[in-house]
Every structure is written in structure tokens, then in C-alpha cells.
Amino acid sequence: MTASCPPSAALRRALIALGSLAVATSAQALTISALSPQGEVSRVSQVVAKFNEDAVRFGDAGAPDPLRVDCDNAAAVRGQGRWRGAREWVYQFEADLPPGVRCRVTPAAGFKSPTGADLTGAKSYQFNSGGPFGPQRGAHPAPTTGERQGVAPRRNAGAGAPT
């Protein structure tokens, strides 16, 4: 035979368990589960951030941007942020970044999820668009006139001023 608790003690235990669950659930923070690009990337056209839970209400066209994208080339950073779902935000640059641009992505001040959770985690993410490619050397089919093989330059940026 097992001892049973008086109804008031059982109710008290249930309320304590429910309260603990509510505190644990509300303490869960909104975090970025994936962000790209990071590091050196030669062709950058957008920044994509994915969140561990709903960061905005689904379909909320007026939802604020959760992140700031700042680059050392003010003209290159022009673009627009948009939500692609409740857990995915995209910053689309107007054009691919030119070579040599360094960017930093930081949480927007005061951004909160629909449940009131603050955006926590890394204070910033960084990437850069690398430098220009050098010439690619390679064999080209020799013309029938017997001319020598040449070098075909391939760059992702304009050549510098002649020296």
C-alpha cells in the first residue's frame, strides 16, 4: 500500500513543476544557428541568417531587421534585408561585393522575438570578399602558324594603373 499525499500537497507539487517548466521555457534565448558567409569568400551577393526558433511572426512584412551589415566600402553595402520565413533572414546586396571589401554583421540593438526573447550569442560575424585573382597560366591550343603558347589573364577586378 502506498501513501498518498493530501490533495493540497499534490496540487502544490504540480504548480511548482508547472512554474519550473514555464521559467525554463521563457529562459530559452533566441540565437543564430547559422550565418553565411564567414571568412574569405570571393563572390558575396547576400548574407543569410538562420535562427533556432521563430524570430518574427510568420508573414509579418513589417518585422524589423535582426542584424546590421556594415562594410568598409559604403557604396558596396547598399542592399535590403527581408524575412524568408519566421526563422530565416536575408540581406541582399544590390550587386556582388567587389574584391577587398571587409564586412561585419552584428545584432540590431533591441531586437526581440515574438516571445520577448533577446537575440544572444556571438557579438559579431565577419567576412571579406578577398583580393583580385592573378593571371591564370595555362596551355592554349597553338595556332597552326607555330606561334608560342600564351598567358590568359583572368581577374575578378579591374587591373591597377600601369606602372
Image (cartoon, helix red, strand yellow):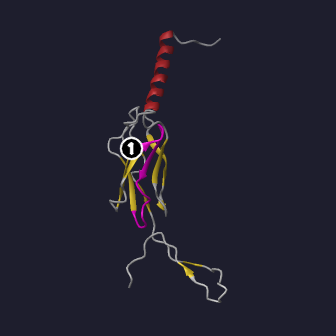
Secondary element at tag 1: loop
What is the quadrant of the N terminus in the image? top right
Q: Quick one: which residue is furthest to the right in this view? A: 144
Residue 72: x %, y % from top left = 34, 62
Residue 98, compared with residue 7, is above or below; it is: below
Residue in view at x 45 percent, y 63 percent: 129
The total number of labels drawn is 1
Residue 115: x %, y % from top left = 41, 31
Residue 162: x %, y % from top left = 39, 83
Q: Main secondary structure of the magenta part?
A: loop
In magenta segment, residue 123: no
Residue type at mark 1: give it: Pro
Q: In the drawing, does residue 38 fall left or right of residue 64? A: right
- Nearer the observer, 66 or 42: 42
- Nearer the observer, 117 or 71: 71
What is the quadrant of the C terminus in the image? bottom left
Q: Residues within 10 Å of mark 1 (few under 14, many from 20)?
A: many
- The residue to which callout 1 is attached is 66
